[in-house]
Image (cartoon, rainbow, N blue to C red):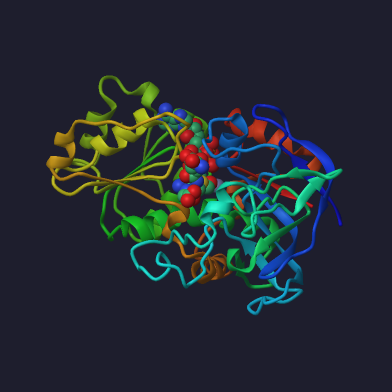
Amino acid sequence: MDVRAAVAHKAGAPLTIETVQLEGPKEFEVLVEIMATGVCHTDAFTLSGADPEGLFPAILGHEGAGIVREVGKGVTSLKAGDHVIPLYTPECRNCEYCLNPKTNLCQAIRSTQGQGLMPDGTSRFSINGERVLHYMGTSTFANFTVLPEIALAKVNPDAPFDKICYIGCGVTTGIGAVVNTAKVEPGSNVVVFGLGGIGLNVIQGARMVGADKIVGVDINPGKRELAERLGMTHFVNPKEVEGDLVAHLVDITGGGADYSFECIGKPQVMRQALECCHKGWGESIIIGVAGAGEEISTRPFQLVTGRSWRGTAFGGARGRTDVPKIVEWYMDGKIEIDCMITHTMPLEEINNAFDLMHEGKSIRSVVTF
Ligand code: NAD
Ligand code: AHE
Ligand code: ZN
């Protein structure tokens, strides 16, 4: 079938809106009509050329919501008409990783997914017979896409697509990092670096679990107001701190953070996030994604003296199990989403979503089809 998609032909170039051919779902695959998709910083990261796994031409996008239109042979858990959220971290419930409660990183299809291919090693997308690659197994910057059954969470059909698409990455990553990965306890002091689409969800997650001080750090003072609304108790702009930022944060938290979260993707900030943690027990969680060749460093003494460095993907969430629950949290008013969706636009204006992100003017832009 012909579909409308934003195609990334090469690194650093704007996306182009084109008609693309999409093959129907094969065995254990599902055709989904995408109704809305968010634009995450990771899409910009891959488009920039900094992603070691970035391949072109591809259809980016991994924060979508839509409706099942057709299921391939062997699909049993979904049917046409079901409302779904695509999962870049699938949940097969069968692999060594899914069977280990310590991780959410299902590996059933990870190798083909990283090559921009479906599990059978081929792509469903093409333009005039030339292959176009999938991205993160989701490719939500198209009005139709094909995904493996294990990469779809079935959600409440009353939930609005243009809001719950954000649960496909940002909301789940931020809240999940607090709840699943760090397991922040009530009364903890938390420092969040980067108050964008991910960091704000870390903040609302920290508020939800009853954190005490929730310190937000961002070089853009425009992020302050929304962060305060979502639960931030102290704001720090590193550009306005006289002296050492880490010492300042240790001071505000009365000895260091119990938990810190890096939601930017900058190795030098990751170091600050680790070093502002409390001696003896502070844990720093890396969420931000850094470019090819970048590395983190610190004095080993930071770890010897009880701080620990950890990371999280998709907030440690098991998508088919956890994503429908997070949709219910939204429907029940337990978490906020609407206030973070600052812009909504048609697919034709998707490049504007990237511009707004780079200019620091948006939190989340959502494309509706
Ligand atoms: P965003 O652009 O919305 O937010 C980034 C924020 O960081 C902005 O508010 C910006 O002003 C701030 N910032 C930039 N440099 C800073 C500095 N030196 N000090 C303090 N603040 C600074 O991005 P996002 O969508 O929130 O994504 C954040 C990061 O998380 C990206 O690296 C993205 O790729 C990554 N990410 C990871 C996962 C995961 O599963 N691990 C999931 C989603 C996103
Ligand atoms: N491909 C990059 C890393 C990108 C990355 O870390 N992606 C996160 C999700 S970011 C969503 O916005 C992730 O899920 N990582 C785990 C995984 O298996 O990809 C690289 O450095 O190669
Ligand atoms: Zn993302």
Q: As drawn, is 225 to the left or to the right of 142?
A: left
Residue that extends furthest to the top in the rendered view of this protein: 242
Residue visible at 71% across and 73% down in the picture: 82
Residue that extends furthest to the bottom in the rendered view of this protein: 76
Q: Quadrant location of residue 36?
A: bottom right
Query: In the rendering, at what x and y percent does residue 33 appear?
Result: 77, 61
In front here: 176 or 92?
92
In front here: 229 or 187?
187
Query: In the rendering, at what x and y percent does residue 40 appear?
Result: 59, 43
- Above or below, 138 against 354 in this view is below
Q: Quadrant location of residue 275?
A: top left
Residue visible at 25% across and 23% down in the picture: 244
- Above or below, 71 against 241 in this view is below
Total labels drawn? 0
- Above or below, 35 against 353 in this view is below
In front here: 231 or 363?
363
- Residue 200, can we see it? no
- Above or below, 287 against 167 in this view is above
Residue visible at 52% across and 58% down in the picture: 89
Query: In the rendering, at what x and y percent does residue 99 appear?
Result: 39, 71
Q: As drawn, is 149 to the left or to the right of 192?
A: right
- Residue 94, can we see it? yes
Query: In the rendering, at what x and y percent does residue 185 appear?
Result: 27, 60
In front here: 140 or 246?
140
Q: Quadrant of the N terminus?
A: bottom right
Q: As drawn, is 215 to the left or to the right of 37?
A: left
Q: Quadrant location of residue 238?
A: top left
